[in-house]
Image (tube, rainbow, N blue to C red):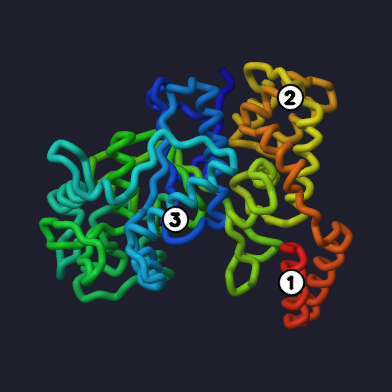
Amino acid sequence: MTTLKLYNSLTRAKEDFAPIDPTDVRMYVCGPTVYDRAHIGNARPVIIFDLLFRLLRQTYGEDAVTYVRNITDVDDKINARAAERGITIRELTEATAAGFHQDVADLGCLSPTHEPRATDYICRGADELDMIKVVERLIAGGHAYAADGHVLFDVASMPAYGKLARRSLDEMEAGARVEVASYKKGPMDFVLWKPSKEGEPAWESPWGQGRPGWHLECSAMSAALLGEVFDIHGGGIDLIFPHHENEIAQSTCCFGHDRMANVWMHNGFLQVEGEKMAKSAGNFVTIREILNDWPGDVARLAMYSAHYRQPINWTLKSLQEAERTLAGWFEAAASEADARPAPGVVEALADDLNTPKMIAEIHRLKSEGGRKALAGTLKFLGFRPEVFADWRAANAPELAISEAEIERLIDARLAARREKNFAEADRIRDEFWRRASC
């Protein structure tokens, strides 16, 4: 068995992966908050951890891996968006969750083993773990306190707080934007439970009608489905602090262990055409907008072009290159596939999901004429020749902008920015996206 090495954000080192129980490898990944269609940045952890799920199943057996990816369906953003659209919260979350499921299916991702919704884990049966029970245990252990209808985690009660982010409490207090509230003992104390306003979702609790804090949800759901300590916890790098730091605080103080998960994995940020994605920048792109023009397999291959821990620059050119590459692979692959992926590909992925090396290995297979091995490898990775062929036959877009024109516009925009002619740079950016989306 190839030794799997994973970079652990907690230790800042690449380590040999040793599951707690090789017959039940357990992974939790933070999923979407369902208030709007997921953007292409949200697709990165979905695609990356789907790849890890496939690798773990290949290594330990399909029935030996439990993958949990949650859905947050109670949140301030959800309440605000439902009110803005004049629909019920349930209508919003159901429609948005359905859109997310369609998006990730079209990206070719496997379904997780479990996909819990936060609202199903607030209050459960007497013998089942839920969010209210976690809060009660934290209060009983001296790690949380009730005040003014809220329950807050007492950060000062946990000396190891900040271990994941590698920051001291003083540093976090100095740099954080924290809510100033009279009922807080310390400025970094965070909400476990809060009262609901009129018209907002509310559940009965020992502290009055209210709803859970965001961080609490993942601690309760992961423990209920994977146990108090599990193997891998994943998500985007933006979740390290405060979300994952707070999850660790809640879970370790509630259950009395020194850790919540043995390995913490975080994918890097995504930019669009060299800039941070933002609606104000005119480069905000949803997964569905990409899938309207490209098959999901092309988007996945483009996402693999950079190592998952590094930033990735999402560009039209990268999609064009991925389409050509995938076409070449499918054309060279045999119709009959090997049962297992090529060893060189598995070895590349076993080295902390080294996808650039994986791509190089697939190119080598193609050049050496390993047609059955190539087919088996593509099948293992979830690439679907029939989906790609159908798209090429019927839906391949005739791009309104050539590669040469893409390069010209990018160079012109960079030149304008160097000259601090930001108005011209913005004009070129707007022209690029207008023409690229035609």
Frontmost of labels 3 and 2 is: 3
Quarter of the image containing the C terminus? bottom right
Mark 1: secondary structure:
helix
Quarter of the image containing the N terminus? top right
Residue 141 placement, left or right of 245: left
Q: Residue at x 78, y 47 (%)?
A: 321
Specify which label sits upstream in the sequence, 3 or 2: 3
For residue 252, what is the image quadrant? top left
* Real-space CA distance between mark 2 and mark 1, rounded to the nearest whole angstrom: 39 Å
Proximity of marks 3 and 1: CB atoms separated by less than 8 Å: no
> Label 1: few (<14), some or many (≥20) within 10 Å?
some
> Label 2: few (<14), some or many (≥20) within 10 Å?
many
**Residue closest to the eye, 5 or 324:** 324
**Residue closest to the eye, 52 or 88:** 88
Amino acid type indicated by mark 3: Thr
Amino acid type indicated by mark 2: Leu
Mark 3: secondary structure:
helix
Specify which label sits upstream in the sequence, 2 or 1: 2
Q: Residue at x 19, y 72 (%)?
A: 183
Residue 176 placement, left or right of 272: left
Q: Residue at x 74, y 56 (%)?
A: 316
Residue corresponding to mark 3: 96
> Label 3: few (<14), some or many (≥20) within 10 Å?
many
- Residue 429: which numbered mark, if any? 1
Task: Provide residue 294's location: percent of width, then percent of height.
Answer: 69, 49
Residue corresponding to mark 2: 374
**Residue closest to the eye, 386 or 313:** 386
* Real-space CA distance between mark 3 and mark 1, rounded to the nearest whole angstrom: 30 Å
